[in-house]
Image: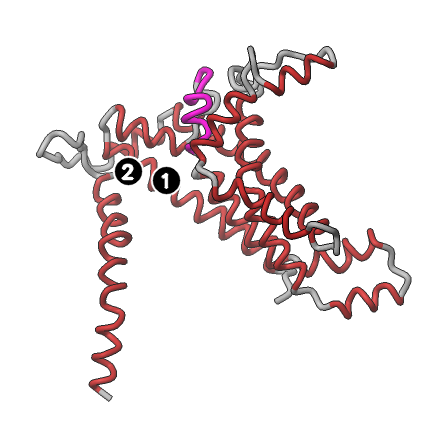
Amino acid sequence: MKRSVRSAYLLIAPYLLFLSVFLIYPIFFSVWLTFHDWNIVSPEIPFVGLENYRRLIGDELFYKALWNTFRFILINIPLQIVIALLLAVALNQPIKGRGFFRAAYFLPVVTSGVVISFLWSWMLSTDDGIINEVLGWFGIGPIPWLTSETWSIPSLAWVAAWKNLGYYVVIFLAGLQSIPKTLYEAARIDGSGPVQTFFRITLPMLNPAMLLVLVMSTINGFQLFTEPFIMTGGGPANSSLSVVMYIYKNAFQSLDMGYAATVGLALALIILTVSLLQKKILERDAYY
């Protein structure tokens, strides 16, 4: 018995070592950094107590970045969920070329976010972008998609939704295919139409998949970085500055690692709180 226990510990030791080095230690080190002032270059790391937290509370730029991130999430998540659900329902039907379309929708997921951001930067360009070119045929525009405080966040939300759409389509497809066919047969016998069947059977039975998509897309939304970093640089006038981009600027441009860690800790707590609230709300009526 003791030998089997020792063998078990030996087998999980590499994983525990990996977990300690790459997860547990960075978390504790980040929390420790929030009480210190470190600029990476200096060997000295002076203790500053709660100064970083006091600075965070009065930091207007942090609140602006947080509001920008919330705006992004409020646009991005409904857009992703609605389009992904509609595509999943369509691809769940016995249509010709279904396998090809499933692969095509998933292609942006495995494509580099940097490449996609550069591609959409060109497409959304005010001067020579293809989207403004097409709108010009109808006498619309040009619209400053990336250089306007009004349009920058919606544009980034669309690009991020387009990139991640295929992943959520796959999740919804898995949920749709797990719904018992007998429920649809019973609904058809009772005279339920397609719309009634969708809202009374399909949507309620998709609650677990919906919860997963909602939590994952929320976490991804709070981690917004690549799109604004490449496409807008956080502008104009910090109107598209995200919290993660603000962390990056403090850490690697201002070399203020202590304050960057403080902002990162605040963001982690916000993500945890929002995710738990979403889980609590949706799990009340979920079917497992």
Give the foreground label among 1 and 2.
2
Q: Can you give x and y, in whole percent of width and height, for residue 12 in the image?
A: 27, 69
SS at mark 1 in the image: helix
Magenta-tinted stretch: 225-237
* Mark linked to residue 261: 2
Residue 230 in magenta stretch: yes
Seen at 21% across and 79% down, the residue is 6
| Residue 224 at x, y percent in the picture | 45, 35
Q: Residue at x 21, y 73 (%)?
A: 10
Residue type (three-letter) at the residue carrying disc 1: Ala
Q: Give the distance between the C-alpha atoms of the residues marked 1 and 2, in whole angstroms.
A: 9 Å
From the viewer's perspective, is residue 256 above or below residue 140? below
Residue 82 position, x and y percent, is 67, 43
Q: Residue furthest bottom?
A: 1
Q: Quadrant of residue 266?
A: top left
Of marks 1 and 2, which one's residue comes earlier in the chain?
2
Query: Is 201 positioned to the left or the right of 1 in the image?
Result: right
Residue beneath disc 1: 266
**Rendered image: mark on residue 178:** none
| 271 relative to 23 in the view: left or right | right
User: Of all residues shown, which one is farthest toward the left?
Assistant: 43
Residue nearest the observer in this picture, 262 or 43 = 43
The residue at the point 83 percent across, 54 percent down is 194
172 and 223: which one is in front? 172
Image quadrant occupied by the C terminus: bottom right
Mark 2 element type = helix
Image position of 187 with respect to 231: above or below: below
Identify the residue shown where x is 63% and y is 44%: 81
Foreground of the two, 213 or 69: 213
